[in-house]
Image (cartoon, rainbow, N blue to C red):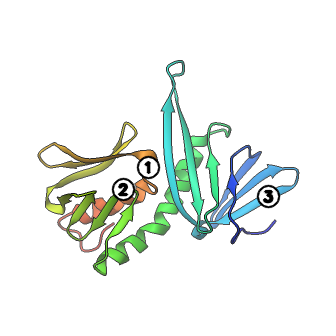
């Protein structure tokens, strides 16, 4: 087994096992085939959830993208898929967030899906919500939403179209905090 670096591939699931380690994860595809990814080589996680009328629970699908463009798809074919996906999401968010902060501190804007975050606020298309007006950025009912202090949901996007939504939320929480020196 070797650590993946380079070569685009799409892994569609069907893994026998997935092992999480301090430095990354290993996918066991069966038949002696394994792939390993370092956390630092994973650049985004996109989450979608579907609640079927005949089921009580929500089916989650996590799409993890590696720096080489390869993708790993984790879903209900795996036991505890939601917990697994949340762990991977946390690891990736911890690694991309400092880069987002550095870019904003340097005066650049950061694009996360349809949102653009900068020192002046958070923007979607031509609509800007300045930081003093931002009350919260959150995931609610399958949507990433930006709410203002007046209670209006100013900006929104379908969560499955926002890679690294968790990192976006943490970034915005830090930037909208009036007392924060550095976001997060």
Outermost front residue = 126
The residue that disc 1 covers is: 161
Check if mark 3's residue and mark 2's residue have beta carbons within 8 Å.
Answer: no
Kindly report the distance in space between the C-alpha atoms of the residues bearing marks 1 and 3.
Answer: 29 Å
Figure check: 182 above or below 15: below
Work out whether mark 3 precedes mark 2 in sequence or the reverse, and give the earlier one. Answer: 3
The residues bearing labels 1 and 2 have C-alpha atoms spaced at a distance of 8 Å
Q: Is residue 38 above or below residue 107?
A: above
* CA gap, disc 3 and disc 2: 34 Å
Task: Pinpoint residue 159: horizontal percent, then vertical percent.
Answer: 41, 46
- Residue position for label 3: 34
Residue furthest to the left: 150
Q: Nearer the viewer, residue 20 or 61?
A: 61
Residue at coordinates 14% horizontally, 56% vertically from top-left?
A: 133
Secondary structure at badge 1 equals helix
What residue occupies the far top of the structure in this picture? 54
Q: Quadrant of residue 107?
A: bottom left
Q: Earlier in the sequence, mark 1 or mark 2?
A: 2
Q: Which mark is residue 114?
A: 2
Q: Secondary structure at mark 3?
A: strand
Indicate the quadrant where residue 98 lies. Answer: bottom left
Mark 1–mark 2 contact, CB under 8 Å?
A: yes
Residue 96 location (% of width, % of height): 46, 68
* Label 2 neighbour load within 10 Å: few <14, some 14-19, many 20+: some
Q: Residue at x 55, y 53 (%)?
A: 87
Q: Nearer the viewer, mark 1 or mark 3?
A: 1
Q: Is residue 156 above or below residue 89?
A: above
Instruction: Between residue 21 and residue 31, name the one nearer to us.
Output: 31
Q: Earlier in the sequence, mark 1 or mark 3?
A: 3
Residue at the image point whose x is 69% and y is 72% from the top: 5
- The residue located at (54%, 18%) in the rendering is 54
């Amino acid at each position: 087994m070797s650590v993946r670096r380079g070569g685009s591939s799409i892994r569609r699931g069907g893994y026998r096992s997935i092992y999480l380690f301090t430095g990354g994860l290993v996918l066991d595809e069966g038949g002696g085939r394994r792939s390993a990814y370092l956390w630092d080589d994973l650049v985004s996680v996109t989450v979608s959830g579907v609640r079927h009328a005949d089921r009580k629970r929500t089916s989650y699908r996590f799409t993890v993208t590696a720096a080489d463009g390869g993708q790993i798809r984790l879903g209900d074919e795996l036991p505890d898929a939601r917990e697994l996906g949340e762990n991977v999401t946390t690891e990736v968010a911890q690694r991309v967030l400092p880069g987002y902060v550095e870019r904003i501190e340097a005066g650049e804007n950061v694009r996360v899906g349809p949102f653009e975050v900068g020192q002046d606020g958070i923007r979607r298309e031509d609509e800007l919500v300045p930081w003093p007006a931002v009350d919260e950025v959150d995931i609610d009912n399958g949507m990433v939403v930006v709410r203002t202090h007046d209670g209006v949901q100013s900006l929104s996007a379908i969560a499955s179209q926002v890679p690294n939504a968790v990192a976006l939320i943490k970034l915005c929480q830090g930037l909208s905090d009036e007392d924060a020196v550095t976001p997060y």
